[in-house]
Image (tube, helix red, strand yellow):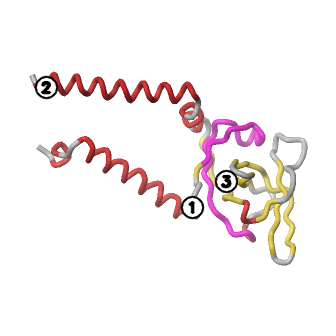
Amino acid sequence: MSKWNQLSKLSKVAFLLAIVVGGYGLFMVAMGTTSPILVVTSGSMEPKICRGDLLIIQYKKAEDIQILDIIVWMDTDTPIVSRVVEIEIIYGEYYYTTKGDNNALRDPGVKSHDDIIGVVVGRIPWVGYIGLFLSSEFGVIIIVLLFLTIIIVSEFVSKGKDN
């Protein structure tokens, strides 16, 4: 019998969770941001970036962000995806004017480098719909029912093996 099979279910879950969390932590360090992935929730950047896309985000220094880069910036507690359309340097500080590709007007105000989470360096179409579904009320109900089903079925299977 392998050592893996000798571990308790809790130990196996803890081990797999440590791998996932550790892997995500390494990804955050590699991308230089605490938010290296983002699910797009609006159509403001269509057709280049669509609702349900999963974005890969990387930190860039202020001077490395260019006009036409697609950035993610924070508006209070909400990440916003926009394209840089103008850059101003005032007393050595960089300020960015942004606009969604699918919006008629520029985004209000300018963004300082401190407002920016990072620059979009990759996009995986449609994968974000999984996250959007799981964060919906219906998705939460489905996940709870799925976990309950797994727990109940595993109890019946383990009782069947005991007999």
Tell me the kind of residue under disc 1. Met
Residue 53, x across and y down, in percent: 63, 40
Whole-Å distance between the Cαs marked 2 and 3? 51 Å
Tell me the kind of residue under disc 3. Val
Quadrant in the rendering for residue 10: top left
The range drawn in magenta is: 38-62
Q: Is residue 24 left or right of residue 77?
A: left
Q: Which residue is mark 1?
A: 31
Quadrant in the rendering for residue 103: top right
Tell me the kind of residue under disc 2. Lys
Q: What is the chief secondary structure element of the magenta stretch? A: loop
Residue 122, x across and y down, in percent: 62, 50
Check contact, mark 1 vs mark 2: CB within 8 A: no
Label for residue 120? 3
Q: Earlier in the sequence, mark 2 or mark 3?
A: 3
Viewer-nearest of discs 1 and 2:
2
Q: Secondary structure at mark 3?
A: strand
Q: Is residue 16 left or right of residue 65?
A: left
Q: Residues within 10 Å of mark 3 (few under 14, many from 20)?
A: many
Whole-Å distance between the Cαs marked 3 and 1? 11 Å
Q: Residues within 10 Å of mark 2 (few under 14, many from 20)?
A: few
Q: Which residue is mark 2?
A: 161
Q: Secondary structure at mark 2?
A: helix
The answer to if 42 sits in the magenta stretch is yes
Judging depth in this view, the residue of 35 and 50 nearest the camera is: 35
Residue 149, x across and y down, in percent: 35, 24
Q: Is residue 11 left or right of residue 31?
A: left
Check contact, mark 3 vs mark 1: CB within 8 A: no
Q: What residue is at 59 percent from the left and 38 percent from the top?
A: 128
